[in-house]
Image: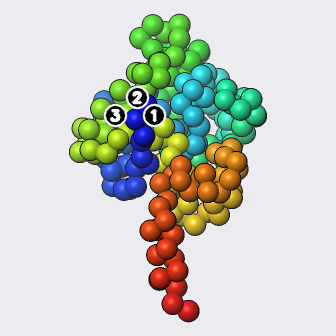
């Protein structure tokens, strides 16, 4: 499996959102919910419409850890959900329905959606489904959220794992020492 990176450029995020929104609201919602929730793709794809329809929070049991995940939906997510619900006919079943509506899209299909959108807007770095989760962690860190809180949100065992996971390099950490000059 290829190592993927978070999207570190907000303009690129906006370009992907615009591209996906113009082409497919389901795929747009997948991207928006992915980068705003930090969920693993396996958990995202198992969401049902009833998990998000008219809700302020999402509650689920993570497949990998078995832990309950309970988090609020941002306004961006709520808006994307609303737009998607207005666009679809049947508001029951899987949130990310495949063409065979009896099941959700696959991880492979999700990868293709995200990767194709990234390539369409000119991103050449390795991008995949895990990019969504890493992007969530990266931007939380850049916003000044304490790494131990991000660690908890991502269910990592240590802050070092979280920093490596979201692509914060030793050089970036060294720059803190150099730039302080107290």
Q: How many marks?
A: 3
Residue at the bottom extreme of this rendering: 182
Q: Name the element at disc 3.
A: helix
Residue that carries the numbered disc 2 in the rendered image: 111
Residue 88 shown left or right of residue 93 in the figure? left
158 to 51, vertically: above or below: below
Name the residue located 53 percent from the left edge and 30 percent from the top edge: 41
Residues 98 and 152: in front is: 152
Q: Position of residue 101 (x, y in %)?
A: 49, 9
Mark 1 near mark 2, Cβ–Cβ under 8 Å?
A: yes
**Residue 50 placement: quadrant:** top right
Tell me the element at label 2: helix
State which quarter of the image contains the C terminus: bottom right
Residue 115 image label = 3
Say which residue appears at 51% left-offset and 26% top-offset.
Answer: 85
Residue 24 in the image: x percent, y percent?
A: 36, 28
Which x, y percent locates residue 9? Answer: 36, 56
| Placement of 76 over or under 176, stated as above or below | above
Between the residue at mark 1 and the residue at mark 3, the CA separation in whole angstroms equals 8 Å
Q: In percent of the image, x 34 and y 34: which residue is there?
A: 115
Badge 1 marks a residue whose secondary structure is: helix
- Marks 3 and 2: in contact by CB < 8 Å? yes
Query: How far apart, in angstroms, are the residues tagged by discs 1 and 2?
Result: 5 Å
Q: Which label number is shown at residue 129? A: 1
Please tell me which of labels 1 and 2 falls first in the chain: 2
Q: Quadrant of residue 61?
A: top right
Residue 63 percent location from the top left of the image: 67, 26
């Amino acid at each position: 499996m290829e190592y993927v990176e978070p999207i570190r450029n907000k303009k690129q995020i906006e370009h992907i959102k615009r591209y996906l929104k113009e082409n497919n609201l389901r795929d747009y919602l997948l991207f928006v919910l992915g980068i705003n929730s930090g969920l693993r793709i396996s958990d995202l794809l198992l969401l049902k419409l009833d998990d998000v329809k008219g809700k302020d929070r999402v509650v689920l049991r993570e497949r990998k850890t078995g832990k309950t995940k309970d988090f609020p939906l941002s306004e961006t997510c709520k808006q994307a959900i609303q737009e998607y619900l207005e666009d679809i006919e049947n508001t029951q079943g899987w949130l990310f329905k495949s063409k065979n509506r009896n099941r959700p899209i696959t991880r492979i299909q999700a990868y293709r959606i995200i990767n194709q959108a990234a390539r369409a807007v000119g991103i050449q770095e390795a991008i995949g489904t895990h990019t969504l989760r890493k992007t969530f962690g990266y931007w939380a860190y850049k916003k000044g959220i304490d790494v131990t809180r991000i660690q908890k949100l991502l269910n990592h065992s240590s802050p070092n794992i979280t920093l490596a996971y979201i692509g914060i390099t030793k050089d970036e950490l060294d720059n803190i020492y150099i730039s302080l000059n107290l």
